Amino acid sequence: DTGVSQNPRHKITKRGQNVTFRCDPISEHNRLYWYRQTLGQGPEFLTYFQNEAQLEKSRLLSDRFSAERPKGSFSTLEIQRTEQGDSAMYLCASSPGTFTSDTQYFGPGTRLTVL
Amino acid sequence: DAKTTQPNSMESNEEEPVHLPCNHSTISGTDYIHWYRQLPSQGPEYVIHGLTSNVNNRMASLAIAEDRKSSTLILHRATLRDAAVYYCILRDGSGAGSYQLTFGKGTKLSVIP
């Protein structure tokens, strides 16, 4: 399968702990995106990478959140000092980078539960 | 990206056509109309997109009003696997817009066997 993969698929943690999620995009896709989705809502944009450069960040991305994409391949999203409000599905997507509005391909997501 | 309006939910019988409406009265000339869907417990997936003319692909058809202020996603024969939340999203194709997708709440489609 050459789609977007995310690990882990599920994560349960206690409030105050740090967590890190990984996203492996489709090979040769230049753009990578992170979204967050809470129950009953559509996904909300968090941040976007063009190769290794983080070019856009939402105001939702507080200083407890950090994302990296070293070498322009896989990406990690870290949440420090987790809070119960961080409980959500974290989705990663990638796109070829041909057009501004090119198709985004999503992974299955990582479901985070903060106790 | 401009805003869209969709019904919260719709029902369809299996093997019948489904027409999912979307209103986008503030659409600009460079906005493309994109549709994504999200099956239960999965990430969203691309369905179809268009600018002015009607579009067809293996998954669905997209009918765009002449004034572009509304569009309709058409599933020609609904199956149980089409039960999902369908999102209508406007994307600026001018090169000046944001790269993010702005999702609303979408339309939850239920398919009755």
Image (spheres, rainbow, N blue to C red):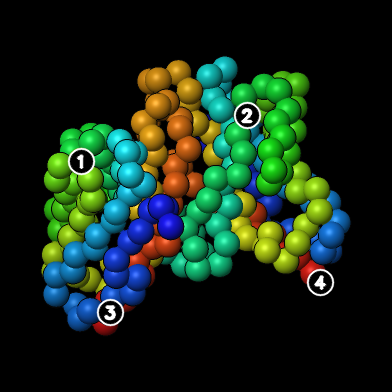
Q: Which residue is identified by label 1? A: A72
Q: Chain of mark 1?
A: A
User: Distance between the Cα atoms at labels 3 and 4?
Assistant: 36 Å
Of labels 2 and 4, earlier in sequence is 2
Callout 2, which amino acid?
Gly
Could you tell me if the residues under marks 2 and 4 are in contact, i.e. CB atoms within 8 Å? no
Front of the two marks 3 and 1: 1
Circle 4: element type: loop
Query: Residue A94: image x %, image y %?
Result: 37, 44
Find residue B94 and report its horizontal and vertical position in percent.
Answer: 45, 18
Q: Is residue A1 above or below residue A49?
A: below
The residue that appears at 48% across and 23% down in the rendered structure is B93
SS at mark 1 in the image: helix
Q: Are marks 1 and 2 on the same chain?
A: no
- Where's residue B105, x and y in %? 55, 54
Residue B113, which numbered label? 4
From where the camera sits, is residue A45 visible?
no
